[in-house]
Image (cartoon, helix red, strand yellow):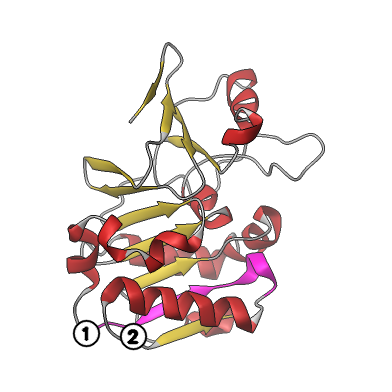
Amino acid sequence: MTVRAALLLLADSQLLFRPSAVPQAARHLAGRPLQAAYLGAANGNQVEFFELACAGLASLLGCEAPCRHIITADDVNGPLPSVVILAGGSVSAGWDFIHQSVVRHWLQRISDNPNALVIGVSAGAIHLGRGCDPEQMNPLAQPYLDWLPHFVAVHEEQQGWPSRQVWQAGGQQGDFLGIPFGGGLWMQGDRRESVSRPCLQQTGRQCRDQ
């Protein structure tokens, strides 16, 4: 699937509060009059996390931005936002909401906008690519949104990236991408850039930091 929107995959939310560490292109892309939306199903739609995300988005943009909390599929009606945040928390709970056909179609429409920015935080970053739910006893590879050809894992560096074993065992197409705690990956078209800390990227033949 061709994605025209810019993607910012974050292992956790701290980089939202360190805008100087994020590529200027992300801030410039989002630095216009805009509408934002936050999908918080992964954390049970807890209001405190929504408020934290709003504060982080304001920090990233350098100004307050109106942000809708998308709780039900009915909430995706109306004008398409130009910035979307997919929350961290439970990979499976987040995906149960995102994979609903009306929500997924809404997200795909946003992905067609070259002036849009989609931010995935922790579980949300996994949802943007391929990956697995590391909280399951026997995790299995899942395609999720498959917006980038990467099997994504986040903040597993202290455990030696156990999700990589799922990727290797399944003979997955595409690279393995490990985003360490405090790190991120910015992608726009063919351009990709690690943010703050190098990401671990491995093909079937080699492993490298990028």
For residue 33, the mark is: 1
Name the element at disc 2.
Answer: loop
The C terminus is located in which quarter? top left
Residue at 40 percent across and 60 percent down: it is 15
Residue at 63 percent across and 32 percent down: it is 163
Q: Is residue 17 visible?
A: yes
The N terminus is located in which quarter? top left
**Front one among 11 and 174:** 11
The vertical placement of 162 against 191, above or below, is: above
Give x and y (percent) for residue 194: 32, 42
Position of 9 compared to 127: left or right?
A: left
Residue that lies at the very extreme toward the right in this rendered image: 137
Give x and y (percent) for residue 82: 30, 74
> Tag 2: residue type?
Ala
Span highlighted in magenta in the image: 34-44
How much space separates mark 1 and mark 2, taking CA atoms? 8 Å
Decide: few, some or many residues near mark 2? Use Cα within 10 Å; few <14, some 14-19, many ≥20.
many
For residue 186, the mark is: none
